[in-house]
Amino acid sequence: MKTLEEIKKSLESTYLSHEIDEKLPLIEEINRLKKEKNAILLGHNYMTPDVFFGVSDITGDSLYLSKVAAETDADIILFNGVHFMAETAKLMSPEKKVLIADLKAGCSLAESITREDVKKLKAQYPGVPVVTYVNCTAEVKAETDICCTSANAAQIVNSLDSDTVIFLPDEYLAGNVQNQTNKKIISFPGRCMVHEMYTEEDILSVRRQWPEVAVISHPECNKDVVAVSDYSGSTSQMSKYIKDSGAKNIFLVTECSMGDNLRTEFPDRTFVSSCRTCPHMKKITLEKIRDALVYEQFEVKLKPEIIEKGRLAVQRMLDLSFK
Ligand code: 13P
Ligand code: SF4
């Protein structure tokens, strides 16, 4: 458990001192409430620094947080992230109370595809295995053979005993996986509204301005962006690359708060400032987190049939990723 002084220090590279002073009482209240209620707060890497450093007990990418959700012995899981992540936590810990501070924290990828769409594709390509990116609803996961995240997409696809794979719903991630496999990938036209905005020209112009820069992109960007990047990986893999490579100047091709959090973790590096905000992730605020704990809202509930089938798809992924 971090002290209030440590939390304060981690907020200094993002907020003005009067803003920190306003946030600290709320952070203290949330940390008291979570102890009283035996709640664990999981924080995705795209949470703002006050949520990320101030109140989240465990932080990470979607893969790691789904593993933590499956293993925790807390009574309540409050997911500081978007709705599909909280649903994944519910799939993996169905007996627990799983909360999210704002039910409208969605995802353009999760909204791009329905269970019916998957059923149609399965009818069109009988016997072809279906891999779904975790950025989809639990209902879609329930129609799936195995899930993947951006940390393990190629590994999961390559593990399947089939020459053709249906990969849903992110067409850009599918394109990047296609470059790492000999299998034929059948994709779907879903996109992340944040990462689809980046173009190859954006990267080339940053490189002209900062010839020494290390460009690190999320694989939800299109394959042309990834091709001109130095590294592409999940949010936690990006962070590991920064640590291991020792890169001094970094251009992150991803969501804005990731840069704020990494600037705090790596104070000796320079982050070229240009980023895109995910409006869904930004719906999660300290005020809403406090209310979520006080009123034990908003609870994620899933039908038993969805839990049974969706859980299998996530568990298969975890078994392959954490052998
Ligand atoms: P990660 O799985 O890399 O954490 O990414 C989740 C996400 O929503 C990226 O936009
Ligand atoms: Fe979805 Fe993109 Fe936001 Fe991630 S950044 S939650 S993929 S809309």
Image: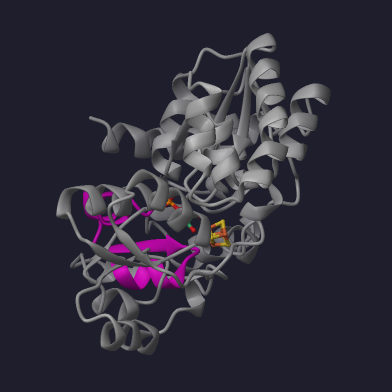
Horizontal side, residue 234 vs residue 258: left or right: left
Look at the image and tell me whether residue 216 can be seen. yes
State the image quarter where residue 101 is shown: top right
Residue placed at 56% from the left, 47% from the top?
Answer: 47
Could you tell me how many numbered marks the image carries? Answer: 0
Residue 107 at x, y percent in the picture: 62, 58
Residue 85 at x, y percent in the picture: 56, 42
Residue 197 at x, y percent in the picture: 51, 79
Name the outermost residue toward the front.
Answer: 17
Type of colouring: one colour
Q: Nearer the viewer, residue 1 or 194?
A: 1
Residue 207 at x, y percent in the picture: 27, 83
Residue span colored magenta:
149-176
Residue placed at 41% from the left, 62% from the top?
Answer: 167
Q: Nearer the viewer, residue 78 or 267?
A: 267
Residue placed at 53% from the left, 67% from the top?
Answer: 192
Q: Is residue 73 above or below residue 262?
A: above
State the image quarter where residue 86 is shown: top right
Residue placed at 40% from the left, 53% from the top?
Answer: 263
Where is the C terminus found, in terms of image quarters?
Answer: top left
Q: Nearer the viewer, residue 23 or 192?
A: 23
Q: Nearer the viewer, residue 320 or 284?
A: 284
Q: Is residue 196 above or below residue 294?
A: below
Horizontal side, residue 292 vs residue 162: left or right: right
Q: Let me know if residue 8 is in the magenta part.
A: no
Horizontal side, residue 82 vs residue 10: left or right: right
Look at the image and tell me whether residue 186 can be seen. no
